Amino acid sequence: MKKQFIAGAKCPQCGLEDKIFVFHQNGDDIAQCNACGHQSIRPKEVEPMEHEDDHHDQPDGVVIFRDRH
Ligand SMILES: [Zn+2]
């Protein structure tokens, strides 16, 4: 399971910031607090950056050349 933390997100239950991470479960985005375990389903219409497909993590602005043969 890949945890993606939401910067600046505040847990409604324990009130801590930067503890919320999201993961996919049954087609939904579940947001969970890493501190107290509070869970909530993220609204579909709010999608900050949801495209990470199969890309490997690469820093922005770095071009990696690959030999195609
Ligand atoms: Zn919490």
Image: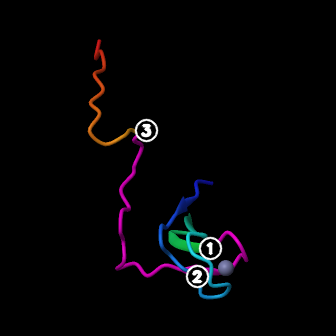
Q: Residues within 10 Å of mark 2 (few under 14, many from 20)?
A: some
Pointer 1 residue? 32
Question: In terms of secondary structure, where does tag 3 sit?
Answer: loop
**Separation of disc 3 and disc 1 at Cα?**
24 Å
Circles 3 and 2: CB distance less than 8 Å? no
Q: x%, y% of residue 46?
A: 36, 77
Q: Of marks 1 and 2, which one's residue comes earlier in the chain?
A: 1
Is residue 40 found left or right of 69 in the rendered image?
Answer: right
- Amino acid type, label 1: Gln
Please name the residue that numbered disc 3 is placed on. 56
Contact, mark 1 vs mark 2 (Cβ under 8 Å): yes
Point out the tag, 3 or 2, that comes first from the N-terminus: 2
What residue span does the magenta drawing correspond to?
Answer: 33-56
Which disc number belongs to residue 5? none
Residue sitting nearer the eye, 48 or 13? 13
Magenta: main secondary structure: loop
Instruction: Please name the amino acid that badge 2 sits on.
Output: Ser
Q: Quadrant of ligand 1?
A: bottom right
For the residues marked 1 and 2, what is the alpha-carbon distance in whole angstroms?
Answer: 6 Å
* Residue of label 2: 40
Residue placed at 62% from the left, 78% from the top? 16
Q: Residue at x 26, y 39 (%)?
A: 61
Q: Earlier in the sequence, mark 3 or mark 1?
A: 1
Quadrant of the rendering where the N terminus is positioned:
bottom right
